[in-house]
Amino acid sequence: LSDRLTETFRNLRTKGKLSPADVDGTVREIRRALLDADVALVVVKDFTSRVRERALGDEVSKALNPAQQVVQIVNEELVAILGGQQRRLEFAKTPPTVIMLAGLQGSGKTTFAGKLARMLEKDGHTPLLVAADLQRPNAVNQLQVVAERAGAAIFAPQPGNGVGDPVRVSKDGVEYARQKQYDTVIIDTAGRLGVDAELMKQAADIRKATNPDEVLFVIDAMIGQDAVSTAKAFQDGVDFTGVVLSKLDGDARGGAALSVASVTGRPIIFASNGEGLDDVEAFHPDRMASRILDLGDILTLIEQAQQTFDEAEAMKVAEKLASETFTLEDFLEQMQQMKKMGSMKKMLGMLPGMGGMKDQLDNFDEREIDRTEAIIRSMTVVERRNPKVLNGSRRLRIARGSGMTVTDVNQLVQRFDQAAKMMKTVAKGGMPNIPGMGPV
Ligand code: GDP
Ligand code: MG
C-alpha cells in the first residue's frame, strides 16, 4: 500500500498541471496510507479534507511545480499536527522540577522513568525517582531495578511510611527531593489495562498534591485506533502537558502520534524505542511525518533539494544552455549547489525504494567538487567561459597551478562536456536532471 503511495507521488511529480481528479486520487491514497498507519478515522477525515482544499487552491495551481507543492502540503500539514517545532521539557525556576508520568498499565511509564532519569543525569541534573505505583505488588521493585540501572536515586514507600497511599508518597517524595536537593523529581504512577475512573482520580489527586511542571502522558505506539479515546480520557481525567510515545521500535507506524497530537493538541516530547535505558530520543515531528507516510525522508529530501537548488536558479541554467553560454563557472556553481545537499547521500540510505537515485549519488563524491573547484580556479576567465581554448599547454599550466595532474584536468573538461550535453537535451523539456528534482 505504501508502495502505491510512493507511486502516486512519483506520478504526480512527473506531471505538469494537476486536475481535480489528480488531486482526488492523491488524497485517496493519502487517506489509505494514514488508515493503514492506524491513524484514527476522525483525524484522517479532518486531515485529508484540509489537504484537498489546499491542493485545489491557488498555491498549487500557481506553483511552478504543482506536484511538488502537493507533496509539500501533505508534509506541512502532518508536521503541523504533530506539533511543528520540537518541544523540550520545561524546568521549574526554583527546583525541584516535578515531572509526573501517567498512562495505561504496560504503556511504558516505568521504563521511561529510567530513561528520563538517565537523560537528565547526562544533562547534569540530579533526578529522584518516586515510586507512586502501589497498585501492582511488584511495581515498586521494578522501579528500584530501573533506578539502579540508571544510577538514579529512588524514593519508595517504607512500611509505615504511607504504604498504600500514592498521593502521600508523591508528596513526600517531592518534599524529600527539596530537602536533599535533587533538582528533578520523576513520579511513576499506576495505570490499569483500560481507562478506569478510580485510577484516573488517583492520578488527578497526585497532580493536585504535587503541582508538577510537566505531566507526561505515556502511550504505546501500538495502541492503534484506541489512541483517541485513551488520550481523551487522560486529558479529561488528569490532563497532561506533553506526550511520550513508547514502543516505536515495534511495527507501529506511528499513527497513534498523529491521533493523539491531533485530538489533544498536546506536543509529543519524547519517542521511546526499546527496552534499553538509552532507547529514547527527542521527538521530531518531521521525521514522524515521513514515518507515517512510510516515505522515508523523501519529503524532507524534496524540500532540501528545492531549497538548495531553487527553481529560478535551475531556469537560469536552462536558459544559458539554450543560448549555448553554459560555462565552467556555471558548472562549478552547479556542483556547489549539489554540495549543499551534502547530507543527502546519508539520508538516501534510509529511503525505501530509492535505489536508482542512490546509485546516482554514490557516484557523487564531495571531494570531487573540491578538486573541480581547485582546477577551475586555476583557469583564466577566458578559459572558464570558453573551454574550447583549452589546449595542451593551457591544461598543463592549470594542472600545475591547481596541484592536479593533466589527466585530472582532462577528466574535468570531459565531465563538463558531458554535463553540458546532458543538460542541453533536458533543457528543452524544462528542468535539468538534478538528483532529487526530476522524476526518480
Ligand atoms: P508501565 O506499566 O506503564 O510502567 O510499563 P512498563 O514500563 O512496565 O513497560 C511494560 C512493558 O513494555 C515492559 O515489558 C517493557 O520492557 C516494555 N517496554 C517499555 N517501553 C518499551 C519500548 O520503548 N520498546 C519496547 N520494545 N518495549 C518497551
Ligand atoms: Mg509501571
Image (cartoon, rainbow, N blue to C red):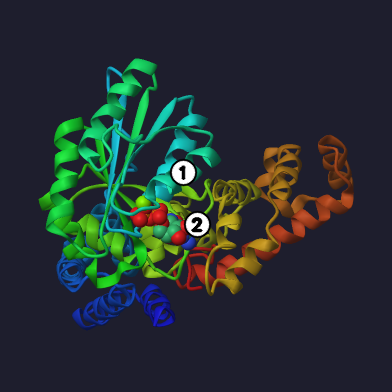
Q: Nearer the viewer, residue 144 or 108?
A: 144
Instruction: Return the x and y of residue 23 as percentages of the image width and height.
Output: 23, 77
Q: Can residue 213 be seen in this view?
A: no
Q: Nearer the viewer, residue 292 or 225?
A: 225
User: In the rendered image, which quarter contains the N terminus?
Assistant: bottom left
Q: Is 137 left or right of 403, judged from the image as shown?
A: left
Mark number, residue 25? none
Q: Residue furthest front?
A: 160
- Mark 1 neighbour density, 10 Å: few (under 14) some (14–19) many (20 or more): many
| Location of mark 1 (residue) | 115
Q: Is residue 31 visible?
A: yes
Above or below 313: residue 72: below
Give the amino acid type for the residue marked by disc 2 in the picture.
Gly
Above or below 408: residue 353: below
Q: Where is residue 105, by image quadrant?
A: bottom left
Instruction: Return the x and y of residue 74 as percentages of the image width and height.
Output: 29, 64
Instruction: Return the x and y of residue 63 as percentages of the image width and height.
Output: 27, 62
Under tag 1, what secondary structure?
A: helix
Give the mark nearer the N terminus: 2 vs 1. 1
- Mark 2 neighbour density, 10 Å: few (under 14) some (14–19) many (20 or more): some
Q: Which residue is drawn at 32% across and 76% down?
A: 33
Above or below 429: residue 309: above
Total of numbered circles in the picture? 2
Q: Which of 364 and 325 is in front in this view?
A: 364
Give the amino acid type for the residue marked by disc 1 in the picture.
Lys
Instruction: Return the x and y of residue 265 as percentages of the image width and height.
Output: 18, 51
| Location of mark 2 (residue) | 274
Q: Is mark 2 within 8 Å of ligand 1?
A: yes
Under tag 2, what secondary structure?
A: loop
Q: Is 377 left or right of 299, judged from the image as shown?
A: right
Q: Which of 402 and 300 is in front in this view?
A: 300
Q: Is 298 left or right of 243, judged from the image as shown?
A: right
